[in-house]
Amino acid sequence: MSVSMSISEKLLARAAGVDAVRPGEFVTCKLDLVLANDITAPIAIDQFYEMGGREVFDRDKITLVADHSTPNKDIKSAQLVKKMRDFAAVQGLPNYFEGGGCGIEHILIPDEGLALPGDVIIGADSHTCTYGAVGAFSTGVGSTDAGAAMATGETWFRVPAGLKFVIEGSLGKWVGGKDIILYTIGQIGVDGALYKSMEFAGSAVRNLPMADRFTICNMAIEAGGKNGVIAPDATTEEYVKPRATRAYEMLASDEGADYEQVFAWKAEDIEPQISFPHLPENARGLSEVGEVNIDQAVVGACTNGRLEDLRIAAGVLSGRTVARGVRCIIIPGSHDIHLQATREGLVETFLSAGCMVSTPTCGPCLGGHMGVLADGERAIATTNRNFVGRMGHPGSEVYLANPAIAAASAVAGKICGPDDL
């Protein structure tokens, strides 16, 4: 008799080479991809050699991306990137990305066809959960675990219990994937899915383009989730098929799959969401925001740096000007996205509006560079975290929102929606 499983359970069972898994069980899984960046890879590399590693388990299944502090912002970051670059050269890694042709890892990797349906992926970055949008089990790990996995090609998991979020209906104007995930975190809290699998379903989710699905899964970690996942469908395959260079398997949850809890919400009840400092769970609808002046607006990051996000922001900014005293920073998610945004005239729209357009980088999201905040400053951003000091000085504040709200706020000089302009 077959056992009914969720998509996350099926993915882990497949990678573990067993017929079925259950929440709480420990399994050892073969990995389809191990990734790290310029901050986490150097530590993983040290661990790799300390455990006696000489050659990585599979050159095609290791991906290293220089995105957090690049273009190199100081001597320390330059040294870290050099260490990663040298390791990639010694190991002969084809999937090393830096400089032109690079991008923010969680946008670049699926766009390069390196994360596919059916995969089990770990990365030394907490937002590795992004790839659940293509129907993979992907999760962040520490650099030590990543280093060990680069040598062995496997790692262990405790099978997470599942939470299912079913959103039915049609989303309203200016509402997208970012609002769904902020609303979700606002409802359950930043530890509401601690070590749980977060599965998103329902007609509102099925009707979302891939960009919005990536956004939702990207922020599963902000609710404490082990992974976020959306069952692959025709939309997924349309995105994946031209990019894939190897076989993939599109799995789905069984009808009788067991979940610890199921949440059911109406899409019509979700308005544009703003997460107030200093936790993503402090989400409230745009109509409840009140008067909040800003000093900076950021559109980009691994959460909302896709071409679709830039098109939305450009649509709001077209024919308008950023408010005096406000810095508006636009960060395309990859070199290819930047190029296409240029071809479509989006970059000209941003520059004409008084925005600054950056090369692809994580930069301001982690308070690294390209938009660090001073004491008392406020930013509205399409990034994924607004912890104390996340974007700079501990006395600064970060408000999370979707690209339309961030762009409109840049024009108004305060948090508002496009319809308020």
Image (cartoon, grey):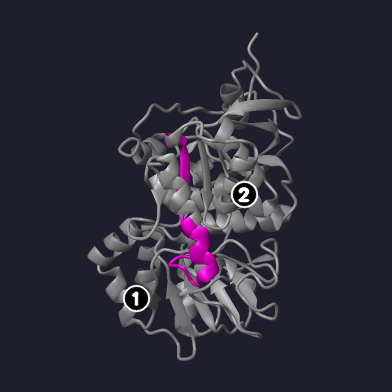
On the image, the x and y values in percent for residue 108 come to 41, 51
Which region shows up in magenta? 60-82
In what quadrant of the picture does the N terminus appear?
top right
In the image as oriented, which residue stretches furthest toward the left? 343
Which residue is tagged 2? Answer: 220
Disc 1: which residue: 350
Q: Position of residue 119 (x, y in %)?
A: 50, 32
Looking at this rendering, what residue extends furthest in the top direction?
A: 1
> Which one is earlier in the sequence, the residue at label 2 or at label 1?
2
The image shows residue 136 at horizontal and vertical percentages of 52, 36
Which residue is drawn at the image coordinates 63% and 57% (left, top)?
Answer: 183
The quadrant holding residue 255 is: top right
Q: Quadrant of residue 149?
A: top right
Q: Is residue 79 above or below residue 52?
A: below
* Residue for point 74% across, 46% down: 194
Category of crowding for the residue at label 1, using alpha-carbon neighbours closer than 10 angstroms: few (below 14), some (14–19), many (at least 20) = many
Amino acid carrying mark 1 in the image: Phe
The answer to if 100 sits in the magenta stretch is no
Q: Residue furthest bottom?
A: 324
**Left or right of 105, for residue 294:** right
